[in-house]
Amino acid sequence: MTSIRDVAKKANVGSSTVSRVLNNSGYVSEEARNRIEEAMKELDYTPNELARHLFHKKTGIIAVLVPTVAHPFFAEFVDKTEVELYKKGYKTMLCNTAKEGNAEYEYLDMLNRHIVDGVISGVHSLDVEEYQKIKKPIVALDRYLGKNIPVVTVDHVRGGRMAAEELVKNGCKKVLHFRGSLAVESPYHDRHYEFDRVMKANSVEVYSYEQEWNRFDNEFFATVIEDIFSKDISFDGVFGVDLLCIGYMNEAMRRGIRVPEDVKIVSYDGTYVTRMTEPKVTAIVQPIQELASVAVHLIDELINGKPYQDKKVMLDVKMQTGGTTFH
Amino acid sequence: MTSIRDVAKKANVGSSTVSRVLNNSGYVSEEARNRIEEAMKELDYTPNELARHLFHKKTGIIAVLVPTVAHPFFAEFVDKTEVELYKKGYKTMLCNTAKEGNAEYEYLDMLNRHIVDGVISGVHSLDVEEYQKIKKPIVALDRYLGKNIPVVTVDHVRGGRMAAEELVKNGCKKVLHFRGSLAVESPYHDRHYEFDRVMKANSVEVYSYEQEWNRFDNEFFATVIEDIFSKDISFDGVFGVDLLCIGYMNEAMRRGIRVPEDVKIVSYDGTYVTRMTEPKVTAIVQPIQELASVAVHLIDELINGKPYQDKKVMLDVKMQTGGTTFH
């Protein structure tokens, strides 16, 4: 471990002079200061990381914004993103924005205040203009945050089509479709439009249920399921995000409705929870590891001033065959 | 927004002098420097957050260490901890330590390098001595990390007893007991000892299966379940963490073993996944919100130099009655 004395010796000054430079207090000649800073660099002396950052103008910290890390999709994304960032020498600052209104702006402001070098944002912003103002490295996960901010997403059109075709193939005639909030500008709406298109082309009746904005908690999902069953409409097919589909399946089974005989279910995201139920849920799986790798690659490129070719990186989805449909 | 000119005016110096202080370059008299720092404080001027931290000697960042945030217990803990830290004005730096060996030490070192003000550690350290060396704010979640580091935990003795009594009451005679790794110094072993004690007192045969250290991923849990069923021993009761119990339940059902008629299951942690299966799992529930609140309260006290009374804060567990046992 390099000590303050090693630095002083190399720079040919007293230890107290090095201290003055480190603490930014008292007089040090320009020449001595230069020699000390040179010695610190050569010896890789970092007594105080913050002081080092002041020299380098980088903090090595990336903020990752998600609505809530308690949700399995965002938990897996944050988990893998943190590991990828770590491999490139970055630390991860986590922000759950669903808790209240201002957290998102506050973290964007941290970009301007040089606390973080970049932001990976998977949150539901209602104010895209705020992102436009910032000329710093930002990468969006499945959100349109402005024309200069690259988006990492999946082929939602194909995902929506695969889900729809699975239900059509299973003979569904009256389907419940849980949709994401229309208040959010996101590529994910594509899957809903495509799903509806295929359903219409096959004369399948679709009952749409729009989720609330910015709610990803289990309490909310429980009230949605309760609400749906209180309407007393029977469906022979269901399409929606993992947690809603699982909630629907469990409530159906409790009421003696058989899965997949009476109702077929295809969920979206395909996180690990779809493999924790019996039967396993048929699902469209998002490649979370790849989403994380690409997001980290892009933010690293932006931080290092490299131009990126694509405004939108679209990854492929795949089908997980479970026991909630017939194959 | 305060500008560099406002600071210069208030301190009665030129803007270039303020710049020299901010950039830590060139000569500035002690007197002028003091006036500039005073003016900055009064005007709350923060052109560069890092420079501000150098004055204040605090970064407002807390590192939260967990094996992996993809695991539902740690996901919920990190989620609630981030919200509690945010309420007190702290930012959360997240580290998943299961990915490789050195991350844990690196984050502890960040305490010494003044990047973070404190560490909340829920990780399985094999080297408690490393923690002992550090005289900075550290709070442990359910781990013994050294005599000076406060621990937030639950009443595992009561939890183990409640689980055991539930299985005894249900008439179990041959029980599978998934244990945490003995390589970890943790209060959680108490639940295992108490579980075994109650079982012995009731002449119930116990088959112990010790989990591997530092493995919390679904791939690992799947291999454990496969391993257990390959041994071809039948059990009429199972006790272990949520994901193992759910894995066991699903595999049992696939093999035509009925739950709870043929095998009773009680899981530990009681995270949301135990409410996503059909039947819902009977579980001992850890109060994750309270664990987070207490951990954040303690780290804040330590950072502010307040002495803490208790080395160990023990919260209560409760029983979630599900359909995997008879009541």
Image (cartoon, coloured by chain):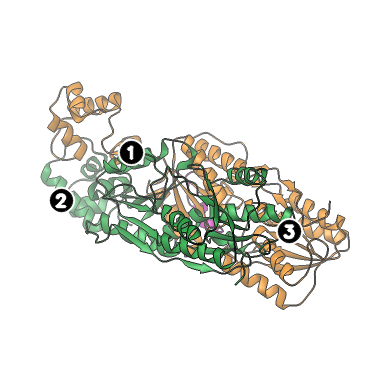
Chain colours: A orange, B green
Give the residues in magenta.
A124-137
- The residue lying toward the viewer, choosing from B65 and B30, is B65
Answer yes or no: do the residues labelled 3 and 1 have beta carbons within 8 Å?
A: no
Answer yes or no: do the residues labelled 2 and 1 have beta carbons within 8 Å?
A: no
Q: At 53% across and 61% down in the image, what residue appears?
A: B270
Residue B122 vs residue B48: left or right?
Answer: right
The residue identified by callout 2 is: B35
Q: Alpha carbon of mark 2 to alpha carbon of mark 3: how far?
A: 61 Å
Quarter of image, res B317: bottom left
Q: Alpha carbon of mark 2 to alpha carbon of mark 1: how far?
A: 25 Å
The residue identified by callout 1 is: A53
Whichever of callouts 3 and 1 sits on the residue coming sooner in the sequence is: 1
| Residue type at numbered disc 1 | His
Could you say whether the residue bearing mark 3 is in a helix, strand or loop?
Answer: helix
Residue B112 vs residue A278: left or right?
Answer: left
Q: Alpha carbon of mark 3 to alpha carbon of mark 1: how far?
A: 46 Å
Q: Tell which tag, 2 or 1, sits nearer the viewer.
A: 1
Residue B163 percent across, percent down from the top left: 51, 63
The residue identified by callout 3 is: A192
Q: Is residue B148 above or below residue B317?
A: above
Marks 3 and 1 on same chain: yes
Could you say whether the residue bearing mark 2 is in a helix, strand or loop?
Answer: helix
Pointer 3 chain: A
| Residue type at numbered disc 3 | His
